[in-house]
Amino acid sequence: MSIHEDDGNSTSQQSRGQNRRGFLRNAALAGAGAAALSTAGSMPAFAAESTKAGKSGTWRPNPTSLQFTLAVMPDTQYLAWGSQDSINMEPLEETFRYVINNSGGGGDNIVFLAGLGDITQDGDPTSFEAVGKAFKVLDNHDVAYSVLAGNHDVTGDDSRGDSAYLRTLGPQRFKRAKSFAGSDPSGYNTAHIFQAAGRSWLLLALDWRTTDAGLAWANDMIKAHPKMPVIVTTHELVDSTYGDNVFPYESGDPENNAVLTSYGQRLWDKLIKDNDQIFLTLNGHFWPNGRMTKKNVHGNDVHMHITNYQNRFMGGGAMLRLYHFDLARNTIDVETKNPWILAQDPAARSPLAQEHSRITGPVDNFSMPINFGERFASFIPLPVRPSRPASKMLVKGTLAYWRFDGGGADGTPVTSAQTIRDLSGRGNDLTLVTVPGAAADALTWSADHHPDQPGHGSLKFVGGRNPVHGAYLTTGPNAPLNIETFNSGYTIEAFVMMPLDWNSGNNGNASILSRRGSAKDAGKQGKNTNPNEPLAQLNITNNGREVQWNHYPLNTTYPTTNWSHGLVELRWWHIAVVNDGRLSKLYVDSSPVAGNPSRVSIGVTSLGLEWLLGAHENDGKVDVVFHGNVGDIRIVNRALHFKDFMTAK
């Protein structure tokens, strides 16, 4: 159904005013929101699609991968117009083969195919006979899919009774489908459950005009599956505000260019707004394409999208909208492509086919950052890993282990009367050093912590330079760690988070952990040597918040430096430095970084001086104090595998 048509069933057109800026934010089932913003613009490396025309592989989606794809097929009506003897199922069948061939293995991990209605132009039995045969491509491969009726497939609401649609694509079609979860008594509203990212997802396929009885069934279906994220598909819900300027979308906001229709408002009021599990709705019917975001009564975002290509070449040619869910990056990347055209020999494609193999406009190809963990928290509470006893962290060779979950109430200052014990029992206890004039809250106890941190607490440093201010901790003058040279290797781990007000000028190059004693006093010289810098320093640099492990080994007179990528604020990071007796490797979140040199670096030079936690020295004087939170720190005298880090499950 296009915006240019009016067959008596369509709702009145909403006013199409200036577009409004939508929300679209954040993703963290396995991460944090700020990280999602930094990665949302980059598409994941999904494998190249299969384009072998006429050949079907095996339906084999991976139900546990954090990357999966929901395929969406809008109005295909112009391919099935039986009353006009105009039926062409080849594009539809090729799209189905694409879904099968890209359902795992080397494909996009397509886990489900959702239709949006108007499968036929006329609802004629001959049209549905052809459509029914085409859908056998999916049935014969046990593909998880849904269909629903559009206004060109049926008339009236879901109380209409028998129809060619119901006889062809009604609930009986799915009786053997593992993903089919049931239908309402009318048969026009169905529920489907697919497996992805290690959990179950509920998709409701609602009729073009669902009655109150149908909506009551939908509400009951959601209540019966209280821990499942829900996607609502229907033929009409939101309409575009672009008006009749179908091409080339020269004006308006592509992130908020849709509005609820009067029928869509009814669905919102009676189904969507009160059910926090509904996070995404998809509909066809109108063009041009568009999307909007609206907050439900719980204050959470519901993303509502129109997708329809019937006005394009070959009536869209069974175009697919692919929603690439990436729960590692906390983003949904959306792209639009035509499998039927992609399966053709590029040299043999017509000019319009070449143009329509992919649709790349701002409403057809975009990314949606969503904090899945936070968005689903009301019905899937984020798992909280319990605190682990310190004794469990004392692996063989542990030289020092500090944690900060028992020193004081959240927000209270660390005092000079307090000693932070080395839980390894080796006597490397820490005491407070306060820069003169520092505020009382320059170093405080905090309940904040990394979700995989053994101790459920941290220290909050409020430090900086120009002038130097803050408070930090130091080992005692006789601590065994002071003389340790790590000849056989080492592993140093720390949990860190930077606040939003961190800036390179005031906070750059501050150390999480450093070893006192200058390079010149240790007789170090040569390339990259700074004579005034400490003998070992684990810093957040002023160069894009990168982690730096800079140390002077025993076997050279000049330093070895490991560099990470930039780290975002307001996210907890696990940092580890591992030396196997020869090479030093820096890890961020158990992942080795690019800036790990191949230079042989044996041990760490010592002058027998103290270690500083949260401060950096220059020429023997503290020149900057750390700004941010520091959680558990562990130092071991051997190389640990990343599977043995403190974050290990």
Image: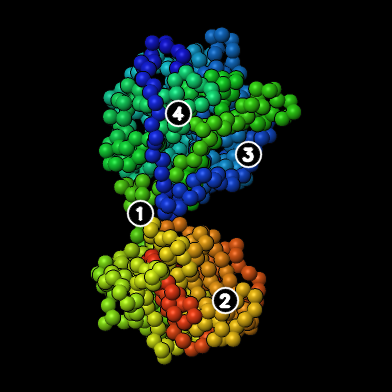
Q: Residue at x 45, y 53 (%)?
A: 35
Identity of the residue drawn at 29% across and 34% down: 273
- Spatial separation of the CA atoms under disc 4 and disc 3: 32 Å
In this orientation, does residue 593 appear? yes
Q: Secondary structure at mark 3?
A: loop
Q: Which residue bears the numbered disc 3?
A: 49
Callouts 2 and 4 close, C-beta under 8 Å: no
Mark earlier in primary sequence (2, 1): 1
Number of other residues with Cα within 10 Å of mark 1, as a class: few under 14, some 14 to 19, many 20 or more: few
Q: Name the spot of residue 598 as percent of width and height, x first.
A: 66, 71
Question: The disc labelled 4 sits on which kind of residue?
Answer: Gly
Q: In the image, what residue type sits under mark 2?
A: Asn
Q: Is residue 96 visible?
A: no
Mark 3 and mark 2 residues within 8 Å of each other at the beta carbon: no
Any mark on residue 382, and which? 1
Residue 488's tag is none
Mark 4 / mark 3, whichever is N-terminal: 3
Q: Is residue 36 above or below residue 411?
A: above
Labels 2, 1: front one: 2
Residue 348: quadrant of the picture: top right
Q: Tell me, what colour scheme is on the image? A: rainbow
Q: Amino acid at mark 1?
A: Leu
CB-based contact (under 8 Å), mark 1 and mark 3: no
Check the picture and name the quadrant holding the C terminus. bottom left
For the residues labelled 1 and 4, say whether their Cβ atoms are less than 8 Å apart.
no
Q: Nearer the viewer, mark 1 or mark 4?
A: 4
Inter-mark Cα distance, 2 to 1: 46 Å
Q: Percent position (x, y) of residue 143?
A: 53, 36
Instruction: Indicate the position of residue 474 as horizontal and vertical percent values.
Output: 39, 81
Taking 316 as reference, is 395 left or right? Answer: left
- Dot label at residue 252: 4
The residue to which callout 2 is attached is 530
